[in-house]
Amino acid sequence: MDHHHLVHFLGLLAIILVGAKIGGALAQRIGQPAVLGELLAGVVLGSSLLGLVDAKDEIITLLKEVGVIILLFEIGLETDLKKLLKVGGASVAVALAGVILPFSLGYAVCWAMELDYLVSLFVGAALTATSVGITARVLSDLGRLQDPEGQVILGAAILDDVIGLVILAVVTGMAGGAEVTALGVAQTTGIAFGFLVVTLLLGLWIVPWLDRILQVFRMPGSPTIIALVVALGLAWLADQVGSALIIGAFAAGLFQRELPMHEEIEKGVASLGHFFVPIFFVAVGAAVDVRTFNPLDPAAHPILLLGGLLVVAAIIGKFAAGFAPFWFKGNKAIIGVGMIPRGEVGLIFAGMGLSSGIFDRGLFSAVALMVMVTTFIAPVWLKWLAVPKKPQRSDSEGIEDLVAGPREED
Amino acid sequence: MDHHHLVHFLGLLAIILVGAKIGGALAQRIGQPAVLGELLAGVVLGSSLLGLVDAKDEIITLLKEVGVIILLFEIGLETDLKKLLKVGGASVAVALAGVILPFSLGYAVCWAMELDYLVSLFVGAALTATSVGITARVLSDLGRLQDPEGQVILGAAILDDVIGLVILAVVTGMAGGAEVTALGVAQTTGIAFGFLVVTLLLGLWIVPWLDRILQVFRMPGSPTIIALVVALGLAWLADQVGSALIIGAFAAGLFQRELPMHEEIEKGVASLGHFFVPIFFVAVGAAVDVRTFNPLDPAAHPILLLGGLLVVAAIIGKFAAGFAPFWFKGNKAIIGVGMIPRGEVGLIFAGMGLSSGIFDRGLFSAVALMVMVTTFIAPVWLKWLAVPKKPQRSDSEGIEDLVAGPREED
């Protein structure tokens, strides 16, 4: 890296961080979750407007991935496994319904628009994604991640990521002309779920040894870094065996919560998160090009029509999925809305559709529109359904109370 | 960045972090400063042995620069400007003697070896560098950064960095065949010192405004990130006007220490430092190839001879400079030894000599040997002279007391 490029990047890093913090502060000021402001800061800095942040840049990609790994690690550290398992049945119901309903609705929309069956499959698959990062961050911003509803959403979103891996493997296999066998699908499914279960069991088993290892590193901050190394290592391992990076990071957080010094680790990871996590959301925002949806451009009309129908399918599918666990006593609307944002996961699906040649530029834009609307609508909607529990550190408490609607309790 | 490359890099990041922490813990266990272990971890991971860490890699370079910026920002935040100015005279004397003596000795060694005069100038220039990062980290590890000796070293090392910029501009100008005018030298000097002074004065002036801005960002961790953005911005600006990145970061720390919430910021920056700073030291260690100095290889003998003489010149020059402020009441040997490590600054000089064609591979290796020996010897020597003041968080206090020599007080 030559000196000029390096210095340019340091300046860009400063702009990304300050943009994210300004966006977050402005969003809070109008009573919205900070993450919405970070995403919008990304749209402003990204290809849509200023063109400063290139979401495909090598270094941005790396920093962003470190950001989402730290975010899921943090969420794992904050998650009580027992509480998560207690709502496990509800999570499974939401996850399954949240895959089947959006997939069917998306496929139906494409069929009605007379699209090819492989294209329809891929669009349907893109609708099944859930961005666990965005929902978890919103719930965490509102202080409601620990609620039963929050735990159901978290569990279902993680399961959705695992299911998403399987679907992605199947549809890309089909796109590549490979024969999809029941055995192959079972194998992919087994690996994806197996990694999570095995890592957790092994992790809980080695906690006493890990604690003794951490005792050796007595320099301030070292336990945090070693714990983070475990998370990075498991993220790497998850990828190597065919699972997803964030599944490894989340599992590392879940079992390291059992460490006696987990509070010190949580604080240190949170400090790193303040730096890395906003980079992730800015990069997600920067990846979207809003100019594709200019309603004054007639060429954009079919894209807007398909995109609009997909938005409706995407919202109805996930919202209805929230009501699948009929036995669950809690606010099912919150669960449904919590599953709506597609975020970076949806963009990954859309990007793979484009790069594999199944989507043309217009189809890609339509799917991106669906991703964008669901991503931006969910934080606002959630905020409206779930009044913040713990007081947010914001100057605009009064405005918030006016803007936020009443919280429904079933 | 393709997915494979990304995942590979995440694994590498885990290895760098765990290597640094293991090296640091081992060094502390035998009573040495942690930074020595981090540098040696770099040698093991770098081109000399395992070849895992490529110090020239784009992303490593960026993370490493963020690391040294955070380190100097942290040191600036910890530095009391009044205390620094109080020993200002001593710092100036040490800095000037620490440039003149090593330069003359280095030039003399090259003259005795019958080297070209331009080569001799460049070698002399490489001997004037001081790695403020390494010395400050050692003193901080030993809890002695706040001592008068520590403040003199810090001031002199910062001045040396500014002088180094001027020398680098002059010798590269001469290497490029440009005519070096007194006016040009004065201009470069003026910019380098002027930036530091103007930034500090302006910074101290805007502190009340900055405080009010920080009050707006009430999310946990946000003040730290905004303060860091100021440091990144000033580092960028310093580079733009022809000064050095770390000068900007240090100045940002110095004036932001006056913020009412500076303790919260210090804690947050320290957490980020636990992640980024070790990457810097590992990368510095990885840049050194110890195989060039194999004494069994006859081809290495002239390199070893020249390198050995330069090591002696480099050590004597800086050690003697510590005694230049004859009026200073304190341990002058600590000051002299504190100025010895050339670290990354020396490597930058050597690298520029090589890339501009003034050094051949052998000369580069000889200068690199000088850099390496001074970098590794200083922490051990300093540790021996300056018994740690605050108890280090280490299991080996007993061993340390045996290893460490008595502290001399003048």
Image (cartoon, coloured by chain):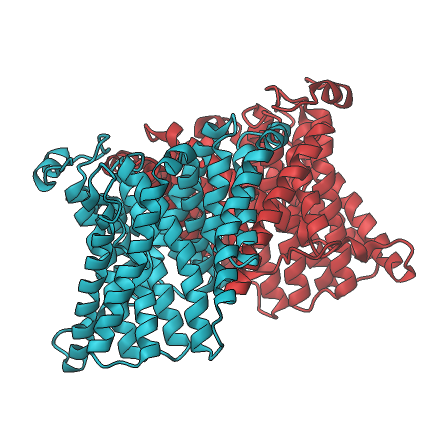
Chain colours: A cyan, B red
The percent coordinates of residue B298 (x first, y second) are 92, 60
Is A176 positioned to the left or the right of A91 in the image? right
Q: Residue at x 15, y 35 (%)?
A: A409
User: Among all residues in the image, which is located at the extreme left?
Assistant: A402
| Residue toward you, A354 or B289 | A354
| Residue B389 position by quadrant | top right
| Residue A364 position by quadrant | bottom left
The percent coordinates of residue A310 (x first, y second) are 21, 67
Is A24 located above or below residue A310 in the figure? above
Is A252 located above or below residue A39 in the figure? above
Is B63 positioned to the left or the right of A379 in the image? right
The percent coordinates of residue B225 (x first, y second) are 36, 42
Is B164 positioned to the left or the right of A310 in the image? right
Q: Residue at x 69, y 51 (%)?
A: B45
On the question of residue B253 being in view, the answer is: no
Is B316 positioned to the left or the right of A156 in the image? right
Q: Quadrant of the N terminus of chain A?
A: bottom right
Marks counted in the figure total 0
| Residue toward you, A367 or B362 | A367
Q: Residue at x 22, y 36 (%)?
A: A329
| Residue toward you, B112 or A223 | A223
| Residue B7 position by quadrant | bottom right
On the question of residue A323 being in view, the answer is: yes
Q: Quadrant of the C terminus of chain A?
A: top left
The percent coordinates of residue A312 (x first, y second) are 17, 63
